[in-house]
Amino acid sequence: MDTIINGLGAGFAVAFDPFNLMLVLVGCFAGTLIGALPGLGPINGVAILLPIAYGLGLPAESAIILLAGIYYGAEYGGRISSILLNVPGDAGAVFTTLDGNPMAKKGEAGRALSLSALASFFGGTFAVILMSLFGPLLASYAVTFSPSDYVALMVFAFASLASLVGSNAVKTLLAALLGLMLASIGIDANTGVARYTFGIPDILAGIDFLVVVIGLFGMAELIHLVEQQVSGKMKALKIDKSFVSWADMVNVKWAIVRSSFIGFFIGILPGTGASVASAVAYGTEKRISDNNGTFGKGDPRGLAAPEAANNAAAGGAMVPMLTLGIPGSGTTAILLGAFLLFNITPGPAMFTQHPEVAWGLIASMYIGNVALLIINLPLVGIFARMLTIPQKYLTPLIAVLAFIGVYSVVSNPHDLYMIIGLGVMGWLLRKLDFPLAPVILGFVLGGLFEDNLRRALSISAGDWSILVNSPDSIVLYGLAIIVALVPVFLRKKRAKV
């Protein structure tokens, strides 16, 4: 404990240096703006600005602090377009749309934005505290997860779909299968066989997640708005001066605590990330708290849960990267590259060889979470006023943001046509009352599930019993069975009453 206290003391001395403090604020503000743009998100924001940070000739600790500020600032910013426009800023913000956007449509955009900012603050701060206290221990446990354990984790995540079914479980399962099919498009890395490419060379490498999420959400929302305008059903959105209240915080406090735990522990597992954490947190919270069927219709708990989870997951992903040199997510993989650029190798030795970098970064994350709250809360009213833009201007604005977000990352004109096609598909699925969140979850988990299943079977020479050989996988399968079957029993019990 003394080592941790002394390390944090030295870290805060580094982070409170006026120049580094300015970099924290700049990184948080820039990250918020980057995250608010649909499709960019933290991974692309850090990747774009890494060469700039290195080219400026900053000291290692200052450059890392700046990039980390962009990282968790973008996690905050992703909620803005999700709540206001129903267009997720990144993968972790997909589940924020489920209750955040309905709140905005009810005239509670200010309340939704401020609530999400506070939930993100608590989730992020909770993760940094746990990282400071138990980081090395948790990281050493996380790397013991075998491919078969990851398969069990994916099964548990899919079982969480039971909480997203709404009124039709069959449509939810079909939507998840559609996501799995989209994830399988491209050349099979093991056999070299092209799957579902239909001779189109531009999709041999598969479909980028960014294209899928912008197409299914952003472009589908655009088509929906155009349809309403043409049919004369467009209604002006009312905007009030709503803000989060103390009663709101009391109502969501346990949702934030539970989701922060879930987000952090899923975040430390390499390769999972905020999208899995927010999905599991939302599903868990809906199962626990949705007694009146209000989730998906603007329930504050349904907004707070994924927001706390995805920011806690961002902190959790830093744990294996800092303590073991193993990136826990795509963004931390880029941060790992930043460390290596400065001839610093993350791992246990970094805390003794480069304590100013390791502890300075951790201390800056405490400061960054506070800074993001201070930056974002006063801007809630300004963001909410975006909804007062006339729909005839808002519709092309969504289109421009969607196309810029995609093209700035993938730089392939074919993908612009792809998001239009996926937008039409998303619009049709909405018309047929198919939920879109399971499609995204299936797409995100599909690649992870297939890769780890193949690794596990390769290790066992095709023996399927390897999937249930470890205590961790057995526990996860048991949890998956429970979360899938308990809602069924509860519905039958209520039907009898």
Image (cartoon, rainbow, N blue to C red):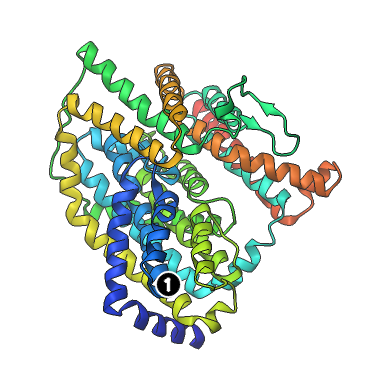
Q: Is residue 136 above or below residue 294?
A: below
| Residue 59 appears left or right of 284 | left
| Residue 446 appears left or right of 96 | right
Q: Position of residue 104 (x, y in %)?
A: 24, 37
Q: Is residue 372 above or below residue 164?
A: below
Number of numbered discs present?
1
Q: Is residue 421 above or below residue 136?
A: above
Residue behind mark 1? 361
Q: Position of residue 36 (x, y in %)?
A: 31, 46
- Picture quadrant of residue 472: bottom right
Q: Is residue 305 visible in this depiction of the protein?
A: no
- Within-10-Å neighbours for mark 1: few <14, some 14–19, many 20+: many
| Residue 70 appears left or right of 323 | left
Front residue of 487/422: it is 422
Amino acid found under the numbered disc labelled 1: Leu
Q: Is residue 40 above or below residue 133?
A: above
Front residue of 241/71: it is 71
Q: In the image, what residue occupies the spot 45% across and 76% down?
A: 357
Q: In the image, what residue occupies the spot 43% across and 29% down?
A: 413
Q: Position of residue 143 (x, y in %)?
A: 66, 62
Which element is circle 1 on? helix
- Picture quadrant of residue 18: bottom left
Q: Position of residue 59 (x, y in %)?
A: 40, 75
Q: Is residue 455 visible in this depiction of the protein?
A: yes
Front residue of 289/159: it is 159
Q: In the image, what residue occupies the spot 68% across and 52% down?
A: 475
Which residue reaches farthest top?
Answer: 231
Front residue of 82/116: it is 82
- Picture quadrant of residue 124: bottom left
